[in-house]
Image (cartoon, helix red, strand yellow):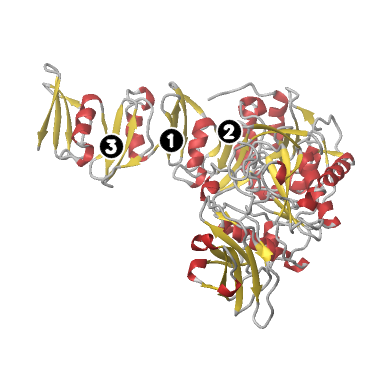
Amino acid sequence: MRSVTTPLSRRTLLSGVVGTSVTGAALLCAQSPASAQTGTALIPTALTPTALQVGGSTRAFALAAQRAASLLSTGDLATVSIGVDGGHMVGVTFPSGASTDTISVRVRTAGADWTAWSDLPLNDSEPDPETAEGRRSVTASDPLWVGALGTGATVQVRLPQADVADAHLQLVDAGESTALAQPAQARTTLASPGTKTSPKAVAQPTIRTRAQWGADESLKKGGASYSSTIKACVVHHTADGGTYSQSEVPSVIRGMYRYHTVSLGWSDLGYNFVVDRFGGIWEGRAGGISQPVVGAHAGGFNTDTFGVSMMGDFTSVAPSAECLESVAKVIAWKLSMYGLPADGAAYLTSAGGGTARYAKGTNVKLRTINGHRDVGFTACPGNVGYTRMDQIRSRVAQIMGSATSTAIDAKYAAVGGAGVLGTPTTSENDTPAKNGSYRFYTGGAIYWSSRTGAHTVRGAILAEYGRLGWEKSGLGFPTTDDSPAKGGFYNHFEGGSIYYSAATGARDVRGAIRQKWASMGWEGGRAGFPTTGDSQAKGGWFNHFQGGSIYYSAASGAHFTGGAIRDRWAALGWERGGMGFPTTDDTPTPNGKGWYTHFQGGSIYWSASTGAHAVRGGFRDTWASLGWETSWLGFPTKDEYPVAEGLRMEFQGGSLTWNKGTNKITAKKN
């Protein structure tokens, strides 16, 4: 186990704050960490199991299968009519990578006249190209809110003739919600005595949660992804020219959410925050409003940024004063948590992709607050909206200039103050390296650095963080609050993660092993929770988990092995026993009758009828040349053992014998 000397002062604090791991677990359970992810302690976030589920639907209509309204077609443009029942929002999708333009729609409800044509620009918000949601993403127009269509309505789509064959109308029904979109109670920040090392931070504005707009959490794909920090903000508009009333705002957001996840294939709503024209601020992508959640708002620049989108089309009209004020408030709060100025410089590396203004790998100097067109080839946030960017920066600076509390104080207030973390037990102090600050409370601690912002650490996870050496242990500062896992809790840190469950305790996972575990689904995958911390092997590292082990060396990479194969490897001496490190994960055999893992020094094969056995050297080479387990030999039934001639291995269909005199291997059928 890697270890670093722990500062006595904070170790002493642990004895009064969390004590044993049992006490730590009790503290973790006393108040759900989900409350640390929202502006109130009373309203659950999307990560809690009580998040609201609502109805709704998405229907896709192939335009090629609909009737063409030829009398309205002109030149190279075709107009296609689709009869629909129900729905609130429309958009048009194409296969990924398609090149199209000039998309317009209009609608007619039963007994009413046609609306005016609305041009739909291609959607220019997008995930980064090499992410899972980026690979799922399709080409699409921006969505348009049209209100309740009712039965017997018609939607007409006007687009180039050449695009009709591949285009689909997406009709989104936003569903109904019983959520009350009442504002959360604003919290007053607390003055704190002592040395202040974190920057001044503004109080969190009122932010309505995903539950309040009625998010159907079953539409999300996988868990949230996190950056290690926040460096900049990107301002958008939704480019939806449709009108909406204040009471319709939750429905409009639900429609966008369903369009992004179902129609476009994204993991979640693309924006981190959405601001309506009445000044309401709404939680967008799940994962925690104070966390550095990676969104899908600015392809190529989603990492280390957060996206704030104004609901509306501000190409030729200005955002309302209420909207601009709320945009400034949420940006000021978020930037202040990371010690960022309103008009500073941000250095970001482009991930490239569709609309990114800079090629992949380009290091770009940007401003702290940017319009979407600053990082992408797009008109967003609209020609008029973009003229308000300096106004937003000035107002953010004004709000931040009036701040009186530190980022740690603001975090304490935001997560619920004494009701969640208890009362302070220390002043705010510098870390020994002067690269951040921390404060302890009766129920946990808050750590801050300019790279990571302020985050809570509690219970058994805090105790393990301290035992390992705090921020000096290689873990660095926390990059998330303590958060609920599947059967436990976790914190991500700059250099790894600590996961806790009652059955396993709190354990650290780092580096390539952590990446492998993440690719398997974290604690929700086959491996389960870690049962050991990051530990040194002979020439590498390992973590044991509830369902197996992940071993890493520079030569072999990180691989998972479990069950009978791991047990056999352990009996042979793990990586020290001649087999070396695994070079593959546990893998099903092609015939589906068993499993195998290749190692540096051989292989272990298992089937239900034969058990797990090691095959090495010439025996393995000969067996492989015959076709492995699909050959007449089948699976091994015994490890190699000495005989008079030399060594022998037995298989289901025969045996292999090595003659020490001739140095040859003979295959024999039963």
- Which residue is farthest front? 75
Percent from the top left, x then y, of residue 581? 38, 27
In the figure, 331 relative to 597: above or below?
Answer: below
Q: Secondary structure at mark 3?
A: strand
Q: Is residue 294 left or right of residue 322?
A: left
Q: Earlier in the sequence, mark 3 or mark 2?
A: 2
Q: Which residue is mark 2?
A: 496
Q: Is residue 191 left or right of residue 585?
A: right
In the figure, 121 relative to 302: above or below?
Answer: below
Tell me how far mark 3 sits from mark 1, CA to CA: 17 Å
Q: Which residue is mark 3?
A: 605
Residue at x 57% of width, y 48% of height: 223
Q: Which residue is mark 1?
A: 549
Residue at x 58% of width, y 76% of height: 85
The quadrant holding residue 105 is: bottom right
Percent from the top left, x then y, of residue 15? 68, 33
Tell me how far mark 2 sits from mark 1, CA to CA: 17 Å
Which one is in front, 53 or 355?
355
Which one is in front, 322 or 154?
154
- Within 10 Å of the Cα at label 3, are there few (<14), some (14-19), or many (20+) other Cα atoms? many
Q: Amino acid at mark 2?
A: Gly
Q: Is residue 536 left or right of residue 69?
A: left
Tell me how far mark 3 sits from mark 2, CA to CA: 33 Å
Residue 417 in sight: no
Which one is in front, 150 or 454?
150
Percent from the top left, x then y, of residue 625? 20, 32
> Which image quarter is the C terminus in?
top left
- Within 10 Å of the Cα at label 1, are there few (<14), some (14-19), or many (20+) other Cα atoms? many
Q: Amino acid at mark 3?
A: Tyr
Q: Amino acid at mark 1?
A: Ser
The quadrant holding residue 319 is: bottom right
Residue 325 in sight: yes
